[in-house]
Amino acid sequence: MRRGRLIQTLTTAAIFLILEAFAVMLIARGSTASRYQLLGLSDRINHAIWKQTDNISHFFEYRKENERLARENLALRNALAALPAAPDTPDEPAPGRFSYTLATVIHNSTGSQRNHLMLDKGSDDGVTPGSAVITGDGVVGVVSAVSRRYCRVESFLNTAQRVSARIEPCGAFGLLRWGGRSPRLATLTEVPMHTQTAEGDTVRTSGYSAIYPPDIPLGVIRKISSDGVSLEMQVELFQNFNVLRHVYIVTDRDALTLKELSHAR
Amino acid sequence: MRGSVAHWIYYLLVFVLQVIVGNHFDGWAWLHFCFIPLILIAIPPTWDVRLSMVLAFGLGLAADLATCGVPGVNAGAAVILAAVKEPLFRALVSPDGQNPAWTPTVRSIGVWPYLKYTLATYAVYLSVYVIFDGFTLTPVLFILAKILLSVVVNVSLAALLSLFLPEKS
């Protein structure tokens, strides 16, 4: 009798531990094989859920007009990317290094600590994991997994994300990360103490991250504080994550070369 | 039998509600709407806890995938709730150790015991969910405020929804 109870308790504990370990493993494994498999598995279900409900929640006319403007923007961005750099700007990326793919957001979360988006472009459209996702108002996130027709984006509104940023006009660098609360506020950290900056200065991507192109506007400095070692700034983001509709997936043609170089000894 | 079918339909609708809310009303940083515990506490306390945990894991993972959440967050929280559900029921609703074979509802156990029970189960579920979601407790005051607000709102909604639960014949 007592032995039976002991076996029952042990099996209950074992099942509990196995299930919890599996759940934690799923959470911890970010953009790995399991994520791809899960994404592929839920691809069709998600298509049915999001596409249909999405259609109801958007006005048809506005949608058409937005799509037209977004296509126009895309053509301009690609034309801009193909232009040769001016001779007096040696820091500009090589001409044609970045290409842009227009995508529509079909799911977007902003209420959690690790938010995600789903876009309607996948490997059939040439999207690869690690690509940056941006809009004209700033960064959106990084592609973490790709299925044939969709990709999953780890949003900038994710406490694990960091973006290398530069302050204008002083040129100082820092790391921008989301604070975990308001979708409109981020924190710029690791800015050197001697930096001459003021509230109202603009923050842009530095281009040092090997993910985001340089000079994408990120936000405006609203508050500056110091911990005695470095400066910390509260940044109001330009990007409004609650109204995201059309985004650009940025493909860096030199990404592989840069990655290989950074791992070379 | 007809009552059982009605129950299944009810829980299916609650799950669909979770998917709709998770996909389209997930914009509040201070509040997380959650209906999974409502389905979990509907599992009668007499059920084998091992079976409850496996069911809870499947349900949580299905919710994660259908709402584009981080896979494992709802699943992990659901398993913990399934494990502590029965001791919570015994402590808060049935101190004499009698576990009913039916689903606890407002009508079957009364308003106050039901509120106590759902409050405790939601507190467990949402605490684990929020911690798993961020894998962090910082900013701690924000996290605590989010858990508190979510528990209050979700328990109110759960009590309201349980009024629509059909009686088993």
Image: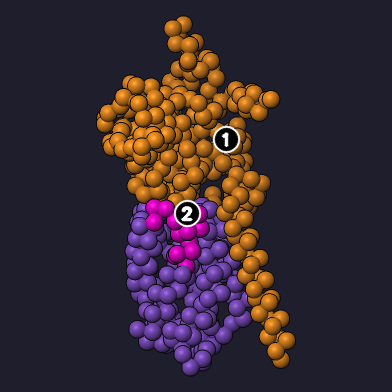
Chain colours: A orange, B purple
The C terminus of chain A sits in image quarter: top right
Please provide percent x and percent y for residue A131.
55, 33
Q: Toward the viewer: B163 or B158?
A: B158
Please provide percent x and percent y for residue A208.
50, 26
Q: Toward the viewer: A39 or A30?
A: A30
Label 2 belongs to which residue?
A: B136
In the picture, measured across the screen, residue A239 lies left or right of residue B66, that is left
Residue at image location 51% in from the left, 81% down from the top: B87
Can you tell which mark lies on residue A130? 1
Amino acid type shown at disc 2: Thr
Query: Does residue A45 sit above or below B169 in this rendering?
Result: above
Please provide percent x and percent y for residue A218.
38, 32
10 Å neighbourhood of mark 1: few (<14), some, or many (≥20)? Answer: many
Amino acid type shown at disc 1: Gly
Please state the extent of the stretch shown in magenta in the rendering.
B125-140
Secondary structure state at the residue bearing disc 2: loop
The N terminus of chain A sits in image quarter: bottom right
Q: In the rendered structure, the residue with mark 2 lies on which chain? A: B
10 Å neighbourhood of mark 2: few (<14), some, or many (≥20)? Answer: few
Q: Is residue A137 visible?
A: no
Residue at image location 28% in from the left, 37% down from the top: A223
Q: In the rendered structure, the residue with mark 1 lies on which chain? A: A
